[in-house]
Image: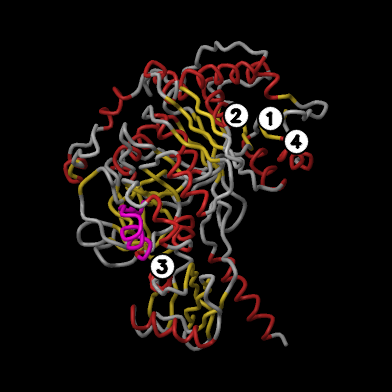
Amino acid sequence: MSNATKPADYADAVANFRLEDFEPLFAGSLKTGLNVCVECCDRHVASGGIALNWESATGQRASFTFAEMQELSAKVANLLTEQGVKPGDVVAGMLPRTPELLATILGTWRAGAVYQPLFTAFGPKAIEHRINMSAAKLVVTDTINRAKLDEVAGRPTVAVVTRPGETVAAGDLDFRAELAAKSSSFEPVLRKGSDLFLMMSTSGTTGLPKGVPVPLSALPAFYSYMRDAVDLRPDDKFWNIADPGWAYGLYYAVTGPLLLGHTTTFYEGAFTAESTYSIIKRHGITNLAGAPTAYRLLIAAGPEAAAGVKGQLRVVSSAGEPLNPEVIRWFAEHLAVPIHDHYGQTELGMAVNNHHGLRHAVRPGSAGFAMPGFRVAVLDDENRELPANVPGVLAVDLNRSPLMWFTGYWQQETPAIAGGYYRTGDTVELEADGSVSFVGRADDVITSSGYRIGPFDVESALIEHPAVIEAAVIGKPDPERTEIVKAYVVLASDYQGSEQLAEELRQYVKKRLSAHAYPREIEFLEQLPKTPSGKLQRFVLRKREVDQTSSSSSH
């Protein structure tokens, strides 16, 4: 497929969608038997292609063919079965973005087992909750992260990836030594569409994270996203910056591209604007995916840093939180590339997108259109569908969404599924053309003097000001107005926080938005609270305001 290929029409893709059209795309069958390692690795061996391009933080580089990953996955599968791991059992991985991580994931799938990601920044409590929830039979980690597991009650067997000169503790398995002794032959275990291949966790704002079981029947949805939204083409060089310790990275930096027989890219080092631009240039990346947090840091580095790769990228995809219109404008001007906003959840994968590979109108500030195979609606509190331009909760119509695979949280109730809908908890508006505009999490919407104000619009207006790199907007409790709009702002390096600048920003937003939606209070911070995957945690700022208010009223 050449880069000049015209995208298909979105309306046609929706009208002609048939789930059965995905069946010929796989070697196996979701009805009679399929193995995810075969779909993501074995069936691409004959192409002679590269499965993984890897680069370490120190610049060490290596490539692994599908044939090499097939052999490594067989060795891992032999190790797992020797340790008593059976089809359907969970294997957890707590590794940086290394070849061993990919081998562990593929080997787990080859054995018919279920892979569970553990983000490397997790502490012992977060790890313990997830391992106990999944009843993981084995954990693969490295020497840097191994110590955290000492504090985990009920810890399963641990396999450790060592570096030269390192040894493992008594009772642990030396991952590399074990693989060296294993056969590179292992017959893939076939599973059905309802069987699991991933065990995820939501990073919920309240309560303990909930388990999200991902069945093999999710594969068509992952395939569709890579093809239609990311528009991954055979001649692309693809890099998804997201960490495979989280859903977007595991679904679409590992499963998705490999499912299409496409090379994926792992960079083991920490994210910086400098490292990102150098990877894009060195590896010839043409198709990039990641989160707005990363893109705003690229912008903060300035146009000069971007100049070396301007025009090289063909398309950029953004997910994790809404994409501010200023980011879209900046990427068009300084990188000469369209960046499209995509919306999803751990429970959905991606479901609403501005599709690079399908022709439809794209509006800045819009999350886009339901992916073909999904039907979304906006609901009121009584589960009634709302008309255009009325805020409500985004929901998936379960009766008319053949690509929807989520059926409920692991071993607990799922109140979000009721009356034939899955309610996402995100407040949106449906536009007249059927696209979806993001307002905020239900908890994030601000009610001030009778107005409902979405924080996203205020944040986007603030980010347009040259002084502002990032902004988070919340409703601060107020006796007169119910809430007032308060903004927390991270400034560019050459600006200093002052009351004069705060007033300038207030007037800027008032002029850009409206007289009622500007931030009456502005506080300058060095950084904003975020999840490890980079999502803004407005609830932390809300709690801080409530705590400050209650502490000042008690004096």
Quadrant showing the N terminus:
top left
**Label 4 crowd bin: few (<14), some (14–19), many (20+), radius 10 Å:** few
**Three-letter code for the amino acid on which mark 2 is drawn:** Glu
Q: CA distance from mark 2 to mark 1?
A: 8 Å
Which residue is depicted at the point 65% across and 79% down?
Answer: 548
**Three-letter code for the amino acid on which mark 4 is drawn:** Gly
Q: Which of marks 2 and 4 precedes in the sequence?
A: 2
105 lies above or below 312: above
Residue 456 disc label: 3
**One can see residue 316 in this view:** yes
**Three-letter code for the amino acid on which mark 1 is drawn:** Val
Residue named by callout 2: 100
Q: CA distance from mark 1 to mark 4?
A: 21 Å
Residue 161 disc label: 1
The label nearer to you, 1 versus 4, is: 1
What sort of colour scheme is used for the picture? secondary structure
**Three-letter code for the amino acid on which mark 3 is drawn:** Phe
